[in-house]
Amino acid sequence: DAGITQSPRYKITETGRQVTLMCHQTWSHSYMFWYRQDLGHGLRLIYYSAAADITDKGEVPDGYVVSRSKTENFPLTLESATRSQTSVYFCASLGGGPTGELFFGEGSRLTVL
Amino acid sequence: GQNIDQPTEMTATEGAIVQINCTYQTSGFNGLFWYQQHAGEAPTFLSYNVLDGLEEKGRFSSFLSRSKGYSYLLLKELQMKDSASYLCAVGNYGGATNKLIFGTGTLLAVQP
């Protein structure tokens, strides 16, 4: 099915463990984004990517790593998870229409114990 | 710097009209977006303003004043299903930078 999908949808891990959140889109959109959403902070941009092999930091990149070897995939890795990284993570891609709207995945809820 | 402000919570009555305000101060501007987010779900696109004025789309309208750094989302004939968070966002598109910066969102509760 066309769209943008994230996996896993729910994840519980422990402090210090590595976690990778996957994001896959079928539209061949060039730009992709990772946001985290926390109560009182709204959506904050972690990293974004303009195309394969081109990535850049957003507002809150510390503790996260991204890669973009293929246009359709944009995984987000927490190399050593901390409790402060407990959050809901949204992946999004930028549509090519005149409005420049973002299309979001369903979200990945991560709990770090 | 980037600063986008909107009220944290609002309450309105079914059938009424509600206006959600958003003010912004950002280093770049290529459009003002409104998204709707129901609890436990992903945000979905509602509206986009790049020029000053009012954009109407059914029961929802969005207004922009670039000189004042101000926008509002107007919801008419409120329905219970309109209970959600409404996110104001500023587009910063240009050169190597294409990103959307969000405010903290306004949680709207529609009461019978």
Image: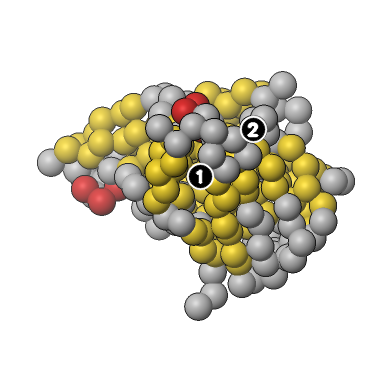
Above-or-below relation of A2 to A75: below
Taking the view exactly as shown, the residue that stands out farthest to the right is: B95
Chain name for mark 1: A
Label 2 sits on residue: A63
Residue A66 horizontal side relative to residue A5, left or right = right
Q: Nearer the viewer, mark 2 or mark 1?
A: 2
Of A73 and B59, the residue lying toward us: A73
Residue A54 horizontal side relative to residue B68, left or right = right
Label 1 sits on residue: A89
The label shown at residue B73 is none
Decide which of tag 2 and tag 1 comes sooner along the chain. Answer: 2
Q: Quadrant of residue B12?
A: top left
Chain name for mark 2: A
Query: Residue drawn at (28%, 43%), measured in percent from left and top?
Result: B83
Residue A12 in the image, given as x and y percentages of width and height: 40, 43
Residue A94 in the image, given as x and y percentages of width and height: 66, 57
